[in-house]
Structures are given as structure tokens and as C-alpha cells.
């Protein structure tokens, strides 16, 4: 079955005065995949995502999201996407139930707070204030808020930064579950092992240009075929695997 693009970016350019942050990049995100946008700081990936999310204007180029043109149908695009907020986006003294209800009011829809918290294993924290949550719990709650409007696409910006190995692996499972339920996921991360495990395809961005789009396996196979060898012997597990195996992988509350 031919995969259909749910996001199409053609010749996207973003200039800030004389500085060219994005230099005519093009790529597609397929419906129902986890797509990683990878690159060093300042590469242009955040600017690209903010334009797709309708949060920033482009200089030129064409973008369609779920069949809607970003120039003429931004309102319809906003209804179909979920964007992960950073911690500063929440009222710290409201509890999770109150925050879910607040977001529902902003969207003009009704959703059960317990139902939303159940998706991210936080029902026992329904009456806890946001500021009382651990780092992993805050990230899971942040993802829950992206799902309130039942989006077709969710954008997750470095969702596991600062988390311990258990919380990180559990968040991977959550992201896979979101994909498996039919939602397309676009993710940025600086952890290449995370992208390798999670992403169906990745795009590398550097200096405002796309320098490659493929599956992680294909990228790795091509590098090996070129004669590349790791200096250290590759083992069947790494130290993080040992940590998880010895300490357990259950949800932990700090």
C-alpha cells in the first residue's frame, strides 16, 4: 500500500533580515508514522516546525497539512494538530484535572480529565498540582494536553530531555502507542539512540538545509557499506539496558 503524505513541505524559506534560517527545504511526512527532524542547535529544525504548526510566518515556499494550505487554511490546520508545550506553558498551582478542563475550554470541547490522564498513566495524580509533578510526569502530562482535541498529528519537541532511563523508555512506549492508535507523530530529539528506536523515518537538517531523509536502518546500512567501522566493539546491549534490567521499567513516582 502506498503511503500518503499528511505533511508536505516544498522549497520552504525563512529569512530573518539578511540571515537565512531555512534555505529552501522540502520533505514529506507520511500518515501514521513517527517522523524525526534531527539536527544540531541552530540548524533550522525548530523554525521549520513552528512554521508548520502555524506559529511562525514563512518567507516563501508551500506547506500543506492534512490537505490544508498553511496560507489559506491555518485555522483548519490548528484544529487538526497537537503541539507539546514546554513547562512554562502551564499554571503551576492548578491541579491536573483543572488544567485539562482549562484546555478543553480553550478548544471548545468536552473531554473527561480522567480519560485523558489514563492515556498517560497519571490518574493517581488527578488532584496534584502541576508544580508537584516529577520531570517524567510533567512530560507525560504535556503529551496528554496535545491529545485533547483528538489531533491527526502531534508535534513533540525533545520530549525526553532530562528524564532518567526508566521515564525515558516509558515515554517511548507512550509515543509508540499514540502512533499505533493512528496519530502521526513528528518529534525532535538530540538523542540519536532515541531516534533510531522510535522513528520510522528521519530527516537530518543542517545549516538550514535538509541533508538526508530515510529510515534509520537505511542510513546506518549505507554508512556501514561505505566502510565505516566503530572503534569500539558493538555489543548486543548497552549500559542503559543494564540499568533498566537491574532497576526495573515500571512507572516510578519521585
Image (cartoon, rainbow, N blue to C red):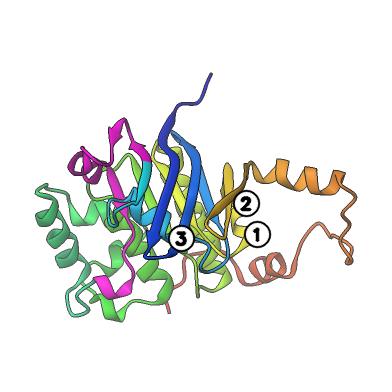
Q: Secondary structure at mark 1?
A: helix
Tell me what residue is drawn at x 21 percent, y 38 percent: 73
Q: Position of residue 140 (x, y in %)?
A: 38, 63
Q: Position of residue 62 (x, y in %)?
A: 37, 38
Q: Which residue is label 2 attached to?
A: 197
The residue lying furthest to the top in this view is 1
Tell me what residue is drawn at x 26 percent, y 41 percent: 80
Tell me what residue is drawn at x 71 percent, y 45 percent: 219
Tell me what residue is drawn at x 29 percent, y 61 percent: 123
> Are the residues tagged 1 and 2 within 8 Å (C-beta)?
yes
Q: In the image, which residues are magenta?
A: 62-89
Could you tell me how far apart the alpha carbons at marks 2 and 3 are, in whole angstroms? Answer: 32 Å
Frontmost residue, 208 versus 170 = 208
- Labels 1, 3: front one: 3
Left/right placement of residue 135 relative to residue 57 reads right
- Magenta segment: does it hold 250? no
- Mark found first going from the N terminus, 2 or 3: 3
Q: Which residue is label 3 attached to?
A: 20
State the quadrant of the C terminus. Answer: bottom left
Residue 193: give its label.
Answer: 1
Could you tell me how far apart the alpha carbons at marks 1 and 2 are, in whole angstroms? Answer: 6 Å
All told, the count of numbered labels is 3
Left/right placement of residue 121 relative to residue 159 reads left
Amino acid at each position: 500500500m502506498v503511503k500518503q503524505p499528511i505533511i508536505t513541505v516544498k522549497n520552504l524559506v525563512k529569512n530573518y533580515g539578511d540571515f537565512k534560517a531555512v534555505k529552501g527545504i522540502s520533505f514529506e511526512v507520511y500518515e501514521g508514522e513517527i517522523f524525526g527532524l534531527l539536527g544540531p542547535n541552530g540548524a533550522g529544525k525548530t523554525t521549520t516546525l513552528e512554521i508548520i504548526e502555524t506559529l511562525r510566518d514563512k518567507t516563501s515556499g508551500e506547506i500543506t497539512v492534512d490537505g490544508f494550505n498553511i496560507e489559506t487554511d491555518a485555522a483548519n490546520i490548528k484544529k487538526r494538530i497537537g503541539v507539546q508545550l514546554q513547562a512554562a506553558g502551564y499554571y503551576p498551582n492548578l491541579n491536573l484535572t483543572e488544567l485539562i478542563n482549562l484546555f478543553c475550554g480553550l478548544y471548545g470541547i468536552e473531554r473527561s480529565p480522567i480519560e485523558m490522564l489514563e492515556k498517560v498513566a497519571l490518574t493517581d495524580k488527578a488532584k496534584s498540582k502541576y508544580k508537584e509533578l516529577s520531570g517524567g510526569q510533567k512530560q507525560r502530562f504535556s503529551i496528554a494536553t496535545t491529545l485533547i482535541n483528538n489531533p491527526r498529528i502531534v508535534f513533540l519537541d525533545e520530549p525526553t530531555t532530562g528524564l532518567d532511563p526508566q521515564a525515558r523508555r516509558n515515554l517511548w512506549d507512550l509515543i509508540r502507542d499514540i502512533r499505533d492508535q493512528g496519530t502521526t507523530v513528528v518529534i525532535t530529539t538530540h538523542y540519536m539512540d532515541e531516534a533510531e528506536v522510535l522513528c520510522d523515518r528521519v530527516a537530518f537538517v543542517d545549516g538550514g538545509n535538509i541533508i538526508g531523509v530515510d529510515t534509520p536502518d537505511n542510513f546506518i546500512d549505507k554508512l556501514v557499506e561505505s566502510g565505516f567501522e566503530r572503534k569500539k566493539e558493538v555489543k548486543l546491549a548497552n549500559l542503559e539496558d543494564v540499568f533498566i534490567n537491574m532497576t526495573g521499567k515500571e512507572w516510578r513516582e519521585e
